[in-house]
Image (cartoon, helix red, strand yellow):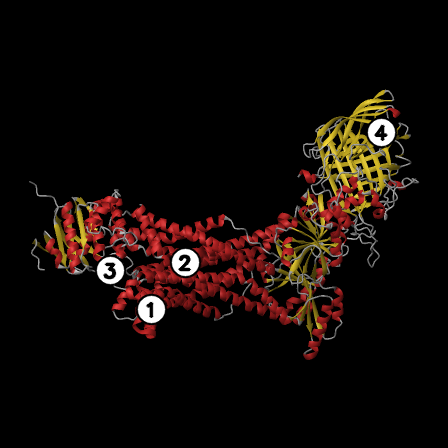
Amino acid sequence: MKIVIKAFLRYLLRRRSLSILQLLGIACGVAAVIGMAISARSALYSFNEAIEFLRGKATHHIEKPAGSMDEDILIEIINDPAVDFFSPVIDRRIRIADGEVVRLLGIDPFLDSNIRPEIVRTISRDRYSQENNVLYDFIYMENAVLIDGSMAKKLGLSPKDTINTNKGIFNVVGTFSNPSGELLIIMDIGNAQKVFELKGMIDRIDLILNDDTGFRGRWGQGFKIESNRQRRENLTALLQAFKLNLQALSLLALFVGVFLIYNTAMFAVVSRRKDAGIMRGIGVRRSEVFLAFTTEIILFGIAGGAIGSIFGYILSRILTDILGSTISNLYFFLRPTPLAWSWWNMLAGIVLGCGASLLGGITPMIDLVKTEPVSALRGRIYQKASRKTVKKLSVYGLLIILMGIVFLFFTSAHVYIGFAGTFIFLIGISLTTGFVLMVSIPLLRRFFSYLSGTIGKIAISNIWLNTNRTSIAVAAFMIALSMAIGLGSLIHSFRHSLIWWMNSQLRGDIYISTRSDVDVPLELYEELKKIPGIGGIDIYRNIQITYRGKPVHITAIDSSVLKKYTQFSWLKGGSENWDPVKKGSVIVSESFARRFRIKEGDTVSIESARGMVSLPVTGIFHDYSTEHGVIMMDRSTYINLFNDRTINSLGIFIDVKGEKRQGIIEQVEKMAYARGLPTSRQRQFHERILGVFDNTFAITRSMRTLATIVAFFGIAGALMTLFVERQQEFGIYRALGFSTGQVALITLMEGIGMGLISFLMSIFTGSAIAYILIKVINLESFNWTIFFYFSLNPYLAAFTTAILASIGASLYPLWKVYRLYPQMQIREE
Amino acid sequence: MDTPRPIIKTIDLWKRYNTDEESFALRGANLEVYPGEILTIFGKSGSGKTTLLNLIAGLDRPTQGKIEIEGNDMEAMGEKVRTELRRKRIGFVFQFFNLLPTLTALENVLFSLELIGKPDKDSALEALSSVGLKGKENRFPFQLSGGEQQRVAIARAIVKKPSIILADEPTGNLDTATGEHVLNLLVSQCKRYGATLIMVSHAMNTCRFATRIINMVDGILVEDRSTGDCEV
Amino acid sequence: MKDSSGFDFKKWNTQGKYNFFNKTRLIWIILPLLFFFHIHFLPVALYSSLSYCYASEWKQAIGHRMWEFPKDHGSHPEYRTEWWYFTGNLSDETQARYGYQLTFFRHSLKKMPQQTDKNHKTYPWIVDDVYLAHFTITDIQNKRFWFTERTSRKGPGLAYAATDRMDIRLLNWKAIMKKNRIFIKAGHQGMEIDLELTPEKPVVLHGKDGLSMKGETQGQASYYYSFTRLKTKGFIKTPLSKKSVRVNGTSWFDHEFGSNQLSSEQEGWDWFSLHLSDGRDLMIYLLRKKDGSVEGASSGTIVEKDGTSRHLALSLINIQVLNKWISPKTKGTYPNRWHIKVPAAQIELTIYPLMDGQELITDASTRIIYWEGAVEGKGMSKNKPVIATGYVELTGYAGSLGGVF
């Protein structure tokens, strides 16, 4: 059937602009999915790489549950029969001159050569390349460091240069290659102890063990021993909610992408109805028409998928950066390197493009092949669905919506069910589009005829007369707009909940050292306490432990200070919840309580430096600081349990008002500055948290933009197909005495009409999505309650998008109208 | 001698388009067409003549009634055989030409041959030249005038040497002179190959070429007059 | 980088004309350090002509030494390099034979002033001496050879050598002398020895009262003494045996220290320590020069059954290589069978390795290769047939690993 296929393919060339649009439609859909998937994979891959690189050949590590440990422990480690190799490590963060936080490992190159041989080997490999002996310098030069290659490149550093850091000036004596992408500085352990004032202390010991059980038996008490598997699991668990988020976004991308491709493919088929009719009329078999269509769709799928995969790859490079900074902000430093281009991406793109295209094309294709040739021959003639069909479809839609809602009720079983429910809900809603069109058309007709008389009326009637196509375009656009509204409302509500939370809990006038890379010396606390006018100082220490195999945080605070100066919001009760905390009870965050199903009055058992202890829970408070859950205890309890006096930061509450308060704030700032400790006043602190928050949602926002772009192509494609096919109809209008401008106006009105209906539907759907995201998905994946705060902005943004996109999408047809006008006549072909 | 068997026979054909409504396009059409006849079905717009033609071509299915082509029940044939029939035994000429816009004149004709399994370029060229399109073989439909397009359509229908040619308002979209020309061509080609021709038309010009004329009013074939003397 | 001695070795390094394997047995103290200090460090130690200014911080092995035991079994940090060398031939109840080598090296990288914190505690991570150790086990029956090594600074109790007695520790490996017995213990990844060594003869001072010359120049020497024959009992475990096996046998202990003894013309060296079945012990070392000749300062020592010893000048020793072995791993060609004649001591022996592949290829990063393994032999001593067992060390035969990989 060469000629049949030839006839089809020539069509693609003749309708170049439409073909390009279709191709772009598929490409955008594929790009959204591939881009999201690659960047998610890049992030997780880099994350694994970073873990692998840092652990080297170690099988385990041992550390104190909290804080550093005395290096004398090494002598016992040496003699433990389970230990094949060991390497003491100081693992800290420093801030380099450009404000970036960098990991610094203090190691002993002799002992570490068995754990991370490549680091030491790299610098001893090029024996003749450098004048100096790198390792000699590394050991003997003051503040000598090795930096990894990417950092050297980034900062333009080479050996013999220096770097300014918050811990002094470091001398670069060499570089090593670090595939993990994490900026890394290596220092001799002796130097590191001096730099961090940790003489006699080490942070952990990396081990190569030959007997896990034996070692744990001897060291279980008071130490935290993690095998690499556990460590990876813990770190992965840390990323769990984030990963889920990524998956949700990838799914969203998939959904929107498939929808767009579906749309495109369907238009491709529908617009070829007449040709198929002619062929059938002269005796072409159904199967041959089917084959020709399939060939065309697959060719489109291949080309669009291939282009899309390249787009997607480019997109992923942008998204990967965003992902990296989000992960770094929330969890731990990670600079994901985008995965290298792989032809598998293209294959995936092609499979996706073809698959979704076939999915989109199959229904109209079957429909077409089934209809009698004569009706196909009528070609595009109004594709009005009968009222009966529309009603039937919307009943199905309602049933599907109900099914989605049932799914949502079972979200607690697994959040994936929630995702599924959401998508089912959306599919259901889109099935009702036809019905909504049917109901709203009379109203719109009135509105548009009020706006622009007969022209408006004609435009709206055109939408209705082509329901079969317009409803799908409207549905696609509606879904994209709803996503935007839903995500926008979620972000807004979350942001306001966060502000509310900060205002109730982070009420200190000034905070010292709220960054993770610096601790506060106890002396400063003692000095500050003596300043008159300071009513209370909250002394804050946060560590991460494993609770029931999952990472959670323990936060030590001064409960009497917090009781006096903050207004924690409790799930139950009020500030009397603080009273038992002073005596050794703990309070837990909402996320902790939900995650582990802990109620007030239960106890939590944690591994402390003195073994397992059970602590009664007296209150549950709202918290957005971490989705992993927080156990909050009084500092006295903490010191008793963990024997760790580290202070991460201080929150200072000032009693006096006015100028004097200002004076005290400045005095505190000076004192902190003298010790090189960063401070932030309450407002700055809150702003910084909001900054992190906004950064965190960067990826979500980019997905939102992506959804809108995809929707734009969807509606543009729909409109364009409609218009391109209807060219001769413009001739009729012309014959009826319409001016070019009026014909153009009809086009525009149709576009705007569709945009408007999409927007109207998205008001409802978007709000529903917002509700689902806030009350179901978020609660299940992060275990915290977000309070709904209404904001008009997402709706306004959606409205603007709808109108602009429909105008934008009408531009090509408008241009076509003006260009073709003179030749237009009432004839076919 | 036996009475020749009708090549086309319809028995009590009914057709309703919209299931919602009680309006029928055909209300019990009975027709017998014999080989070599040139038949014109004449009627006003909406009288059901195109519907009848479409049903005979198997492009649509009757609501009720029976069609026999060369003695075979069309309904009993099934879609596959009906397609084969269209492909090999029936040529169709449409009012709006219905050439495939993306194929050249030659390709459109060749396509028809390809469908019967004889993609012979020479036959196609010959068919085109016999309808007076020599030299325009490689033009696309939009590069041809309406009359030329219809000639391509005729070539497309004739080239496969079908026993039946159905023409739906073959001149409906053409000016009178061109229409005349095209009709001449159509009829002469049919005669040349001995094909049975059924034309439907609301214009009188077709009558002149017919051996038989049938009138169609509101879905019923009402009259069967003898040849030639229709009012022009 | 300016060394505190005033010697600018950076300048030296750039001239870099040295041969990687032109050294004596002592080089093995320094070689592992190449891992950390590249080879640039090496010429400094190698060029004896300049070593005065460089090594001036450390004491030189010059002149007569007043030996004082057990204090001299301990560490001599005033000298730059020092090692304690244990080798032995053992067998278990089933007469399966084993060889072992356990060597501790102490090498001073830099003289560092002791740093103390405000509590007057010394700061342990300061690097002055670096300790290294090599540990091998040869399972003769199964023809297997295992090797492992380690390096450490002193750190907070990581490595240590007492100055008043033999008490050397490197992580969990150790050699401690209590009363008249030496306890050595080492283990790693399935290899383990736990041995008790009892000297059967008194200390033997090599060379001239323990001053063993390694070249012509003054200071190109070390102080060197041995327990040539130690009755040995204890346990051995190999990755193959999975559990400890009780063993008995005879060991040899060397202790040597000095500051710069190396000459640029020397290419490598052969060292023999042999126990004869008639109770005599023989030590010979031959320093090979690049030109193929043997360093005139090479020598040996014969120890009689009663413990009396005699210095053997090179002229009294005649060694003939009977066979060679090419290492499949490094392509180094090693002598593999010797005929040793010391007429002055009435000794004539044929010596051969108990297993060929006793080659130490240290981690690719250290790039050191040498052969050190258990040997046996037969021959005549004082006109009576004897059997010999012992250890042989062969250096400078395999070139640099850099060329191999």
Q: Which residue is mark 4?
A: C282
Q: Which residue is mark 1?
A: A744
Q: Chain of mark 1?
A: A
Q: Is residue A196 above or below residue C379?
A: below
Q: Position of residue B120 (x, y in %)?
A: 25, 43
Q: Amino acid at mark 4?
A: Leu
Q: Residues within 10 Å of mark 4 (few under 14, many from 20)?
A: many
Q: Is residue A770 left or right of residue B161?
A: right
Q: Residues within 10 Å of mark 1 (few under 14, many from 20)?
A: many
Q: Amino acid at mark 1?
A: Ala
Query: Dots 3 and 2: beta carbons under 8 Å?
Result: no
Q: Is residue A175 above or below residue C275?
A: below
Looking at the rendered structure, the secondary structure element under dot 3 is loop
Q: Which residue is mark 2?
A: A427
Q: Is residue B12 visible?
A: no
Q: Which residue is mark 3?
A: B20
How many marks do you count on the picture? 4
Looking at the rendered structure, the secondary structure element under dot 4 is strand
Viewer-side residue, A363 vs B106: B106
Q: Are marks 3 and 1 on the same chain?
A: no
Q: Amino acid at mark 3?
A: Asp
Q: Residues within 10 Å of mark 3 (few under 14, many from 20)?
A: few
Q: Chain of mark 4?
A: C
Looking at the rendered structure, the secondary structure element under dot 1 is helix
Q: Residues within 10 Å of mark 2 (few under 14, many from 20)?
A: many
